[in-house]
């Protein structure tokens, strides 16, 4: 409740009623700020997604270039005619080592791509959640607007 009115000097201009309580505005500002915050977060997530995609593309490019360079460097050893069994075994081992190196590089490339897909999947999920929340808040605002319009119509004087 409000405090009593102090006596005025000229009482003919002062109402005997107590002053009105401050208007209790609905938490519309809080709601709008919440929606703004959600939309801002959605934009930030989208920007982070683009940055992640860019980083993953860059990583994939670097790994693919490394794979290509390693593949170009791999020269499978050839056994000379009349080579001994020890020489043949050494060359086979060397070739297996080259193949293992190439396989490791391919595995790194696949792992990097899978990690990128996981990150993008999480980002996409977050974006979908933010969009759903924004849609729910938008529906709430539309409903609130409709209620406000109805109240305004009811408060209009009859013509």
Image: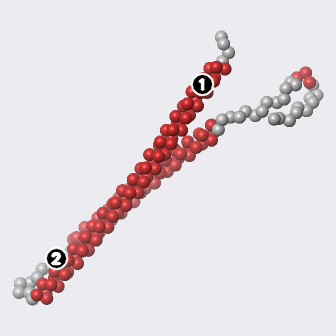
Q: State the residue position of label 1.
A: 149
Residue under the image location 38 percent in, 57 percent down: 118
For residue 82, above or below residue 27: below
Residue count near mark 1 (Cα–Cα under 10 Å), binned few <14, some 14–19, many ≥20: few
Question: Residue tagged by mark 2?
Answer: 76
Position of residue 21 measured from the top left corner of the image (x, y, whole percent): 78, 33
Q: Residue furthest front?
A: 1
Q: Relative to 89, does residue 148 appear above or below in the rendering?
A: above
Rendered location of residue 105, percent (x, y): 28, 69
Label 1 or label 2, whichever lies nearer to me, is 1
Q: Secondary structure at mark 2?
A: loop
The image position of residue 154, as x and y in percent, is 64, 20
Residue 23 at x, y = what percent? 73, 33
Q: Which mark is residue 64?
A: none
Image-quadrant location for residue 32: top right
Q: How many marks?
A: 2
């Amino acid at each position: 409740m409000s405090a009593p009115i102090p006596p005025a000097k000229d009482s003919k201009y002062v109402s005997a009623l107590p002053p009105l309580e401050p208007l209790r505005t609905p938490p519309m500002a809080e709601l709008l700020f919440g929606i703004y915050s959600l939309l801002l977060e959605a934009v930030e997530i989208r920007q982070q997604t683009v940055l992640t995609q860019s980083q993953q593309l860059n990583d994939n490019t670097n790994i693919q270039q490394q794979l290509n360079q390693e593949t170009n460097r791999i020269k499978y050893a050839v056994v000379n005619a009349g080579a001994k069994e020890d020489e043949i075994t050494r060359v086979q081992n060397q070739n297996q080592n080259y193949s293992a190196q190439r396989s490791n590089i391919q595995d790194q490339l696949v792992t990097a791509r899978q990690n990128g897909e996981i990150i993008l999947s999480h980002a996409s999920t977050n974006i979908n959640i933010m969009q759903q929340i924004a849609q729910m808040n938008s529906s709430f605002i539309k409903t609130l607007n409709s209620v406000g319009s109805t109240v305004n119509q009811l408060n209009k004087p009859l013509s």
